[in-house]
Amino acid sequence: MHADTNADLFSLAGRTALVTGSSRGLGWTLARGLGRAGAALVVNGRNEPALAEAVAALADEGLDVRAAAFDVTDSEAVDRAVGDLQRDGVTVDILVNNAGIQRRGPLEDLSDADWRAVLETNLTGAFLVARRVVRGMLERGRGKIINICSLMSAVARPTTGNYAAAKGGLAMLTRAMAVEWGGRGIRANAIGPGYFATEMTRPLVEDADFDAWVRGRTPAGRWGDPKDLVGPAVFLASPASDFVNGHILYVDGGILAAL
């Protein structure tokens, strides 16, 4: 069904969005933005007290929101949580695979545990959640999947080899989803944030040399603000992007063009 007006093009009214890793940071901001565009929200995280706080903050804004506490790397927990949502009558129309971690270190010194943790959370977790959620989407013949990739999906820097491998893999997983499910009404795309000022990147923001490097190399001359991701997310979740599939939209202030 095509939207009749420009406002309809970007409306998420009547849709439900599940955003993984959304109890704080970029995920919470993305969930809030999708909710403000009309979507009912399912926020996710492993820390139940933090998740409850996130739900309360969104509900205080008048948004329709519920929590789903599960670990994206645990396939049984994923299946159970999505099944519980379905039994409650919740159909996930929009999936945002945002859950991610970072563990830095030189590749030659990187432990097995740090390698696996980053790959399992950032890449395998997206696969596990999408594999379960897409079944309902395929039955209904429609759905939007948005994977949160990274600038590191296209370039690498020292001490981020595990993260670059995971996010590069996520970019290709996005394309695989688009090819496999595109003919059945599913659109799978990704957002690739550049350098954003978040809780996770605070040590980098506070490093004067690195801060100067980011500002100097980014044509926009600044770090990204989490709110900069909301517009792209709403676009990719909405009818406005119904003919966009398998695309990685870099939201990076132009740094990829300048590297």
Image: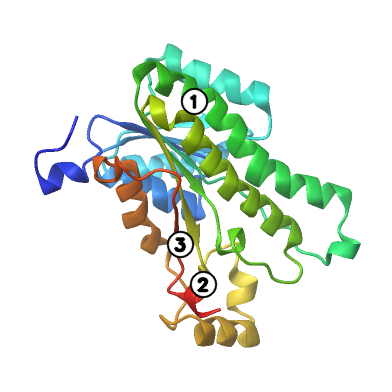
Quadrant of the image occupied by residue 229: bottom left
Residue under numbered circle 1: 133
Q: Is residue 54 visible?
A: yes
Check disc 2 and report its element: helix, strand or loop: helix
Sequence-first disc among 2 and 1: 1
Q: Is residue 46 visible?
A: no
Whether residue 171 sits left or right of residue 56 in the image: it is right
**Residue 198, placed above or below residue 191:** below
Of 87 and 146, the residue lying toward us = 146
Quadrant of the image occupied by residue 45: top right
Q: Label for residue 256?
A: 2
Residue in the picture at 59% in, 20% down: 79
Point out the frontmost of discs 3 and 1: 3
Residue type (three-letter) at the residue carrying disc 2:
Leu
Residue under numbered circle 3: 250
Residue in the picture at 44% in, 50% down: 247
Sequence-first disc among 3 and 1: 1
Residue 29, position as x, y percentages in the image: 41, 53
Callout 3–callout 1 Cβ contact below 8 Å: no
Check disc 1 and report its element: helix, strand or loop: helix
The residue carrying pointer 2 sits among few (fewer than 14), some (14 to 19) or many (20 or more) residues within 10 Å by Cα, namely: some
